[in-house]
Image (cartoon, helix red, strand yellow):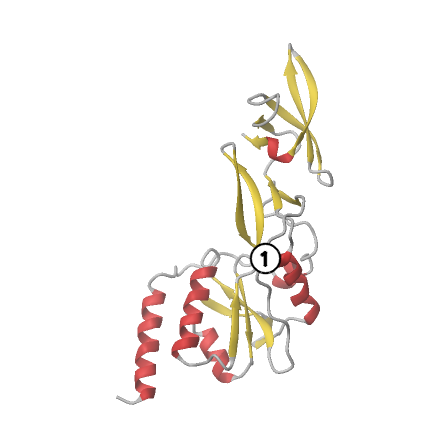
Amino acid sequence: MSEENEAATAEAKLTHAAAEEIPTSLSPLVDFSSVLSQVEEVDGSGQDETTVEESPQPEDKEALPDVSDDHSWYVIHCYSGYENKVKHNLLQRIETMQMQDQIFAVEVPTEDEIEVKEGKRRTVQRRIFPGYILVQMKMNDDSWYVVRNTPGVTGFVGMGTKPTPLRTDEVHGIMRRMEAEAPKIKVTFRSGQKVRIIDGPFNDFMGIVDEIDIDKAKVRVLVSFFGRETPVELDFLQVEKM
């Protein structure tokens, strides 16, 4: 069997195996250009959630390679929640089809986030752009074919049928988000909601959120003492939504 036939057979097997693990329904996608316009703003993953930065904690993080004259960063749509699986599929296709000289990097941008769940604090990695993957490549018919036909990829971001590369300032904005030394604190409560205090002298007390100070990462909670509501100022990580 020739090398071309062997490569084609390997690609077919890989595509079939990968496709079996990718769902056929696609979650709604947001406009990526509008997402990019907010890369330096405070970002939340839900209507009632906010994220703020905690004090810096130095940590080595892998950055995006910079833009070059002969290749650029492009954005592809994928199935939301399957970004890492699609990235794995694409990396396998690049290796199988020997496209390392045309497709150089595949990244799912993430950032560290601190969340409090069931009274426990933990640091998790959150996807910055759910439903999107960044690919650094030389754009031509061959490289386009390899990326576009990867199981789970639903298309390139661009005008019409032409993929549009990210601008240098857009790449740098994403890099700053990925390299941020200060983890973000996920705030899942809002004014008027009932919360439970999980740390400090008022541990296990219930209260109502009266005011949220994003800049200071503080929340004022109204706690009932002897039938009277008393305001108590707490850190975000000292309370959790009920």
The residue under label 1 is 60
Q: The residue under label 1 is which amino acid type?
A: Asp
Residue at (38% x, 77% y) in the render: 96
Residue 241 x %, y %: 56, 32
Instruction: Examine the rendered structure and indicate whether residue 193 appears above or below residue 124.
Output: above
Identify the element where label 1 is drawn.
Answer: loop
Q: How packed is label 1: few (under 14 Cα within 10 Å), some, or many (20 or more)?
A: few
In this image, 173 relative to 14: left or right?
Answer: right
Quarter residue 8 falls in = bottom left
Residue at (64% x, 78% y) in the render: 68
Residue 117 x %, y %: 51, 36
In this image, 21 relative to 152: left or right?
Answer: left
Residue 21 shows in this picture: yes
Quarter residue 74 falls in = bottom right
Residue at (54% x, 51% y) in the render: 126
Instruction: Examine the rendered structure and indicate whether residue 226 appears above or below residue 176.
Output: above
